[in-house]
Image (cartoon, rainbow, N blue to C red):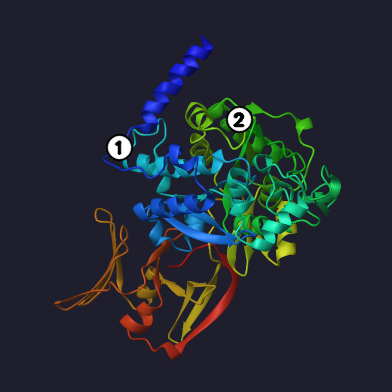
Amino acid sequence: MTKIFRALVMITLLLTITVPSYGIDKVISFNDLHAFSSDQLFEKAQKLVNTYPYLLSMEVIGYSEDLKPIFVIKMSKNIYNYKPVDYVEKTHILIDGGVHARETFNPAAVLKMIEDYVIDYYDDSYLPNYNVRALLQSSVLHFIPIVNPDGFDVAKMGVNTIDSPILRQKINVLIPNLRNDRLKANIRGVDINRNFEDIYYDVKTGKWVDQWGDSAVQVIPGEDYFKGYTPASEAETQTLMAYMLTFDFKAYVTYHSMGQSIYYRIDHLGQAYFSTNQTFANIAQKMTHYTLMAPNDYEEFGYSTHYFANNTLKPAMTVETTASYNFPTPLANYYQDYVANRLWAIPLAFLEEAKRIGYYDHKLYVDNLYVRDFMNLDVAKAFAEKLGGVIYTYKGKPSYHLSKNVTIEVNESFKLSRSIMSSEGLVYIEFKEFFEMLDYEINWIKETRQSSAVKGNSQIIINLSTFDVTYLIDELVVNLTNTLKPTLYKGRLMIPIVFMTEIMGIDSESLKIIEGNDVVFKDLF
């Protein structure tokens, strides 16, 4: 009965996920991608991004040894209008595939995932149980479909796909009697997923530990398992390592093949981390019905998941797709794993869980910019020392920039004690404090959410829903649309200092700004 039930479920999901919606012409087809080279995948990805520029953007983040592009597709609402502050305003998740050469299904699965999310954005009935439109309001999904394009091409089509004649000749020397379809490594014979730096901070000893050299299955270049002579020796490894630290990713999932299993047991980072990672693994297991791997199945180091976890203390796991031992992966397995095993659902489920967890209290700042948060204070302090940063402990979402309390003196006329200055020098003053100093009457109209300062025939009105500013003097109405927007800080209405200098006509040379010692966690726009 179980097999019959699962077959019915697969048929139902196939109907759900393959019917075009809202007249959208699909770009991604497993039938096409199954035969594609890495160049063709790249072109198809470009077409997908160009079709949906409102939601998708592409960036080449590095190149393989044979100078083939390694690219990321970022997905979010209004992605073309991405701002630096979205580093904290939105939740970031990282997904990749194609680390191992012969695992040819996963790049196609990642690209199809992107398109399916796009379709569900416009038609919420497309993917069951998830509302992509709602999630993308405050999230960015980062997809790197193919990390090892050189190896991917060799595994599919042979060494003649290598553009460089030097590298083409070299692979035959490095790996004599190469079986193309069994290649996991890159074209230098290095298994990328064992080539990552594996350094972590041990809270028990208070020391940094490098476990990369603790084991070696293969000691010379080969089809698989050779981790390189030094960590991070490969262009592909370096590209992914750099990108992992470019954003404050809240989770990482890497799709590999084969075995329909989930590797998640990273147990050297403490019980709190292990428990969190296990929670995410259980979510993935519930989605896919894959097997959670036992502790004795972890014999190597230098995995991409280790590097990510060691540096972020965020959930990281390897999802081994497909049951076939045949490579390149047969087309029949594409539909079975993607649909029946719901591989597409894992990033969305991880995103929901990451949003539920939110931010940890210990937040690392380097050069006055937020980098990432940590669940463990000792680890946070170790990274602060390593990176030349500072840890601030406070609850809730971090501000991207650090600011400071400042006092502003205007000659000997008055002093503003509740002002804020950003690390870039942008200054905000408190609306109430400033206008009361000038003998204005401050009013608050709850029904319209407006705050105003009135004195004689002069009136400043600020809408606290839109932060639009209107200046009335006599019969003249001036909408200050080109002025920096006011903002709120701890319930206080803060206005840019240009209100003093440009609107109220106070000479900027008469201002003296005295920095305080109190740090303010507020992004000033």
For this view, does 175 lie left or right of residue 319? Answer: right
Q: Residue furthest left?
A: 475
Q: Residue furthest top?
A: 1
Residue identified by numbered label 2: 282
Amino acid marked by disc 2: Asn
- Residue 368 in percent (x, y) is at 59, 68
Where, by quadrant of the figure, is residue 485 drawn? bottom left
Closest to the camera, between mark 1 and mark 2, is 1
- Residue 509 in percent (x, y) is at 44, 91
271 or 104: nearer the eye? Answer: 104
Check disc 2 and report its element: helix, strand or loop: helix
408 or 234: nearer the eye? Answer: 234
- Residue 25 in percent (x, y) is at 31, 43
Residue identified by numbered label 1: 21
Mark earlier in primary sequence (1, 2) = 1
**Mark 2 packing: few (<14 Cα in 10 Å), some, or many (20+)?**
some
Where, by quadrant of the figure, is residue 63 drawn? bottom right
Residue that appears at 84% across and 44% down: 215
164 or 334: nearer the eye? Answer: 164
- Residue 290 in percent (x, y) is at 60, 27
Residue that appears at 57% across and 25% down: 289
Check disc 1 and report its element: helix, strand or loop: loop
Total marks placed: 2
On-image quarter of the C terminus: bottom left
Q: Is residue 411 visible in the rendered structure shown here?
A: no
Q: Is residue 435 visible in the rendered structure shown here?
A: yes
Amino acid marked by disc 1: Ser
